[in-house]
Image: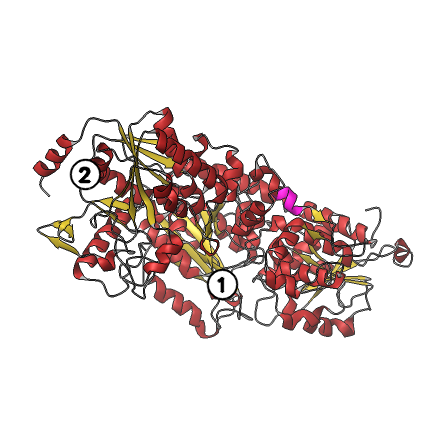
Amino acid sequence: MSNNYIISIKKSFPKKRRAIVSICSNNYFPYVRILFNTLQKYHPESELFLCLGDKQDSLFPLDIDNITIIEAEKLNIPHFYDFAFRYDIMEFNTALKPFIMQLLLEEYNFEQVVYLDPDIELFAPLESVFFALDNGSDFVITPHITQPSEEDAYPGDIGVMQSGIYNLGFIAVNNSNQVINFLHWWGRKLRFYCLNEQHNGIFVDQKFVDLLPAFYDNVKILKDTNVNVAYWNLLQRKLEKKDQSWLVDGKPLVFFHFSGIDINNNQRLSKHSNAFNSNLSQDLQELIDDYISKLKYYSFSNNIIPKYIYNKFTNNVFIPTIIRQIYRKLNNIWYENPFISFSDYLNQFNYNFHQNSSDFPLTNLMVFFWKNRLDLQTSFNIFNHNEDRKRYTFWFLETAEENQFEYYFLEPILDNISHKLSHYKSLSFLQNNSNFPINVIGYLKTETGVGQGGRMVIKSLQTANINVEGYHIDNIESRQNDNQIEDLLVAKINSPIHIYKVNADQLRIVKNLVKNYSNKPDFIINIPGWELSRFPQEWVSNYDDIDEVWAESKFVQIALQSKLSLPIIHMQPAVFLENFKAVNREYFNLPKDRFLFHFNFDFSSFSSRKNPEAVITAYRRAFRHQKSDISTALVIKSRGYDPNNKNYQKLLEIIDGEEDIIIINEYLSHSEVIALMNCCDCYVSLHCSEGFGYTLAEAMLLGKPVIATNYSGNCDFINQQTGFPVDYKLVSLKSDEYPFSQGQKWAKPDLDHAAWIMQKMVEDSSHTKQIALAGQNKIATDYSPISAGQRYIKRLEKLGLIVNC
């Protein structure tokens, strides 16, 4: 289209104050950048606005000049936080439409306002739209389809009837009494009913506008087939490119609506329909490819997606959709700001379903969730049936992850269970057991994480002045030369309290091994490690004679408590650095002048879980094609049981001789491992899951910044204030990736996000140091042997097993 043609059209427009507005959250900026750039090209006479269904984030600016951004909170929406809490991100953004249009008409006094969805691209001026407005139409809307659509592909006639006759990705209005009245009616409806519930006859903001032509005159139903072209009507329209211009049914394409486009799949027009899926015409393929290339061009650095501000409570707990649904149904309760208050309400126990103190009470969240699911009502009769309440409680814990309920909503449930199931001893227990030792049983000389964990239990009890002994279990797959607690090891166990620091799979085996070298204890505690969200049923019988389990992370606590009918107590362990000799980088043949990222893993801990390939890939994405004034390298320390060096050779093949990726595959003592970590600048762990994450905590205690997958046990001590958590999505395990993998999920870290963090860490040393110091203080304070020892004492005193310590 020639520039002369565009100019002639612009001159034909009357000089009215026009606003064109779109709505999106920060995550949709790549789309709205395309829209605004085409609007500035074809409508420079109009003032452009973005209603931001979010908060502005300095890390993610819009980066387009002459766009006025109005945050949703600044609109005149009654009880805004109640309004925002009701809706998910899609519902919320669509619900803002009448309110931003009211603001532009009533307070900014624009004569005409046009709304366009952010995933629209203009190819010509909106001539027909403004012609209709200039010639007396108060409203201009476009139908989804302009002739019968009886194809098998969605939406078709029936799909359009279900979702709305008119597509509300576009609407244009004049400033008139009719329009103001309509917008206020529409706003009152969307205040409470902007719901994605087609089965109930509601589809966010759209279905309400079906009534518009019945309510008001001067409604222009614009049937031009070159306007608002999209997957829902393209089967009925001919798209083609001629002489570098896009045409629809022989007329210049005005705007195309790329609803449901997938930046990672150029063979499909929309995720909402299979009508155009791997069967694209040459012209349509070119249109899609061009739009996707623009999306990639306008995408965020390293493809990082900004966080949605209204996705969390003010206490930083995630809000699942089911909680919004529960909130909407409680019409008799009014919360001025549910982002602050509603989470506490959900955690309160609902006492309508039990009769005495021995019953299992349910929290409000558990009750409302049960009421929302017919299958749960069928499976669990929670009315006056304590056993069903108990079964439902354990089911709720087991499925918490898939329902996106964070630990915050499980903590009161776990506390209640531990209280109900704990075996409290009378203080008379102590009369015949004065000054007895507590015996810790585990791989106490083994140079592994579980061995170090056992040694830390002993050191913590020592700091609390508890008489403690250790019994070492041989582990033939690992070196057993760690002598930190050699003087506390005994050949025969004689203690009323046994603490097994062994994992669940080995628990029965180890108990049988020590049977001939041990007295019969009065109380048995197990401190296991486990790395998946569901605990294997096959190991439950190993706990027949265990009185209590101490879980080193909240993640492990939830996994075990959902399957074991004994108290699982969250007991943070100690993280301690033995005296190690600091060395310079030459000792390990490391480069002197580079920023060194470091990762340490054990082949025997399952390479698939530790995920070293992810660290390598993220490092490459961060620095292979990025200019930086600071040189970098990645140091990977591997170790552990690796027959025939099979895993090591695979690792060498992956790095393919890259000089800035250094592999150290040799046995080092624990103090040497710490010395190596101390030589590096940052620790990175893009694991799929961790039971606790000792190595990460050790790096933090050294004052190193830690980048880690924001999932599983390490979330107890790594957050935005203490470390650099990496986004992830849950994926199903493959059968050969981990024991008892069937039906399990774990994290797939976002490598783009990890690469972005790596870059930012190198660029902003002051922020990195600030976070590293906070992380060091966190571990030094909350995970010191003294703190852990005090926690052990407090629990043992509560159980009646020790006194006056």
Q: Nearer the viewer, residue 742 or 754?
A: 742
Q: Determine if the magenta segment contains residue 345.
A: yes
- Residue 562 in the image: state x and y as whole percent: 65, 62
Q: In the shown orientation, is residue 604 left or right of residue 260?
A: right
Instruction: Please name which of the two marks, 1 or 2, marks the residue nearer to the observer.
Output: 2
- Please, is residue 392 above or below residue 788 in the view? below
Residue 155 visible somewhere in the drawing? no
Q: In the shown orientation, is residue 204 left or right of residue 329?
A: left
Label placed on residue 609: 1
Q: In the shown orientation, is residue 663 left or right of residue 572?
A: left
Who comes first in sequence, dot 1 or dot 2? 2
Q: Amino acid at mark 2?
A: Glu
Label placed on residue 127: 2
Asked which colour scheme the image uses, the reply is secondary structure
Q: Which residues are magenta?
A: 343-347
- Residue 683 in the image: state x and y as whole percent: 47, 50
- Please, is residue 541 above or below residue 453 in the view? below
Give the Cα distance between marks 1 and 2. Answer: 58 Å
Q: Determine if the magenta segment contains residue 465.
A: no
> In terms of secondary structure, where does tag 2 sit?
helix
Q: Amino acid at mark 1?
A: Arg
Q: Nearer the viewer, residue 246 or 504?
A: 246
Task: Check disc 2: other Cα within 10 Å, few if <14, some if 14-19, many if 20+.
Answer: few
Image quadrant occupied by the N terminus: top left
